[in-house]
Image (tube, grey):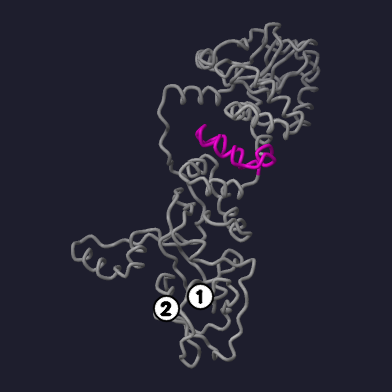
């Protein structure tokens, strides 16, 4: 094994031992899940047109690189679009340790030869990497060993790294996207908060719209707003469309009026209309915390009709807490549990199955009242109605948890134990 800091600046010699020039960088190309060395960039080649292909390399060691061909027969080529320069793209840059769930800085790069090819096997993010670059690794390690405090290595396998800094090349996007998918959105949100603006945007570029929406929903409000402002209106609108309508409305409400209007105009018409409606309600009211996504069924539906409807529409699990029953004018008249529905005679209409004693909130009730009602009556969700009794939406236990955490509790610890499959 060898580290890139031990190679950069060392001479490149041809097969006869004639020195050509010092090493400036190593080019690499992604193959399967490995980043394989594909060429050598020599010092002084600012245009990157004289890359020595790896096929001409005989040996790589801390003393330099020896070619297997003579200088006269050496053929070079330009840097290819699918290649990256390791020093330029990775050294001293921020990366995400997807196993330790943290942002770290790359101090060195470890290379190894396997099956006849050189590849990047790990990134060094510890003090040892810095000392190696300064030429102080050996004396400092020896001293600390004598003091009984050995200098630890902190190497992260390349497969456990998402590279974020620098230009978002096709290679980096592909590699980082695969690795970032392994991180839960809640954990990734905390990682995003620790990154600089450029790296934050690169994370978003590496995620599809649905995952990006999940991550934004978990970030702190100021970070969420900052990221959204920095995205193109088209991409921001696509992400907003994937968010829960109440979350999208809360986020849009933090933006300047002109920016918010522009984003809503870019959204799907139906989803935009839902967000506009939610924005009419004050944030600290029950209506301001509700989601307009729920299951409302007409009272003349039978149990069989209802089961057929649920099968056809396959609503998300969080909307199956309770089934709400409405009259012809959309007024809330009852609530039904899944247990009652499943055990009922298929021909029984919902008006004969529903519970007419419904705990509900007015749209003008406070958000605190919503939290209090859910806690008092041990509910998972509570409906919100207007002055005419028409069902507008529901406040879920998730919404209440956000209210309580924001108002009464400090932020929870960032790390939790989780089983990870290698």
In x, y percent, where is residue 266? 72, 35
The N terminus lies in which quarter of the figure?
bottom left
Q: Tally the marks.
A: 2
Does the magenta-highlighted stretch encompass residue 234? yes
* Above/below status of 383 relative to 50: above
Q: Quadrant of residue 325?
A: top right
Which residue does the numbered mark 2 point to in the structure image? 10
Q: Which residues are magenta?
A: 209-238
Q: CA distance from mark 2 to mark 1?
A: 14 Å
In x, y percent, where is residue 239? 65, 38
Which residue does the numbered mark 1 point to in the structure image? 44
Q: For the residue carrying disc 1, how many other residues have a C-alpha within 10 Å: few (<14), some (14-19), or many (20+)?
A: few
Residue 317 relative to residue 284: left or right: right
Mark sitting earlier along the chain (2/1): 2
* Above/below status of 391 relative to 59: above
- Considering the whole magenta stretch, tell me its main secondary structure: helix
* Above/below status of 258 relative to 344: below
The one of 81 and 181 positioned closer to us in this rendering: 81
In x, y percent, where is residue 158? 50, 61
- Describe the element under mark 1 as helix, strand or loop: loop
Single out the mark in the foreground, 2 or 1.
Answer: 1
- The residue located at (18%, 62%) in the rendering is 147
* Above/below status of 143 relative to 219: below
- The residue located at (42%, 55%) in the rendering is 105
The one of 264 and 335 positioned closer to us in this rendering: 264
Residue 7 relative to residue 75: left or right: left
Q: Quadrant of residue 115?
A: bottom right
In x, y percent, where is residue 200? 53, 46
- The residue located at (63%, 59%) in the rendering is 170
């Amino acid at each position: 094994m060898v580290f890139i800091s031990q190679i950069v600046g060392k001479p490149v010699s041809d097969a006869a031992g004639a020195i050509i020039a010092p090493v400036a960088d190593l080019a690499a190309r992604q193959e399967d899940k490995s980043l394989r060395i594909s060429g050598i960039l020599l010092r002084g080649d600012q245009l990157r047109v004289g890359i020595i292909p790896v096929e001409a390399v005989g040996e790589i060691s801390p003393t330099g690189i020896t070619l297997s061909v003579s200088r006269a027969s050496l053929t070079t080529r330009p840097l290819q679009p699918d290649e990256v320069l390791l020093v330029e793209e990775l050294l001293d840059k921020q990366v995400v340790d997807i196993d330790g769930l943290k942002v770290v800085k790359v101090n060195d790069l470890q290379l190894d030869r396997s099956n006849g090819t050189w590849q990047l096997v790990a990134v060094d993010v510890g003090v040892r990497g810095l000392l190696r670059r300064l030429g102080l690794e050996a004396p400092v390690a020896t001293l600390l060993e004598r003091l009984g405090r050995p200098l630890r290595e902190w190497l992260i396998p390349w497969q456990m790294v998402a590279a974020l800094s620098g230009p978002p090349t096709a290679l980096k996007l592909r590699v980082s996207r695969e690795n970032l998918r392994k991180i839960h959105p809640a954990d990734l949100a905390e990682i995003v908060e620790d990154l600089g603006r450029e790296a934050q945007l690169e994370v978003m570029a590496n995620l599809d719209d649905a995952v990006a929406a999940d991550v934004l929903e978990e970030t702190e409000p100021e970070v969420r707003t900052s990221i959204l402002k920095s995205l193109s209106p088209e991409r921001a609108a696509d992400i907003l469309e994937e968010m829960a309508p109440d979350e999208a409305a809360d986020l849009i409400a933090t933006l300047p009026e002109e920016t918010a209007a522009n984003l809503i105009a870019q959204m799907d018409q139906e989803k935009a209309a839902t967000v506009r409606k939610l924005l009419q309600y004050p944030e600290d009211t029950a209506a301001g915390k509700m989601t307009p996504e729920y299951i409302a069924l007409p009272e003349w539906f039978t149990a069989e009709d209802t089961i057929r409807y649920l099968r056809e529409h396959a609503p998300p699990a969080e909307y199956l807490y309770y089934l709400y029953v409405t009259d012809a004018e959309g007024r809330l008249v009852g609530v039904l549990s899944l247990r009652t529905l499943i055990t009922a005679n298929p021909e029984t209409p919902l008006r004969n199955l529903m519970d007419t004693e419904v705990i509900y909130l007015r749209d003008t009730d406070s958000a605190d009242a919503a939290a209090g009602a859910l806690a008092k009556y041990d509910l998972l969700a509570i409906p919100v109605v207007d002055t005419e009794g028409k069902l507008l939406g529901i406040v879920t236990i998730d919404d209440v948890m956000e209210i309580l955490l924001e108002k009464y509790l400090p932020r929870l610890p960032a790390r939790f134990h989780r089983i990870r499959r290698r």
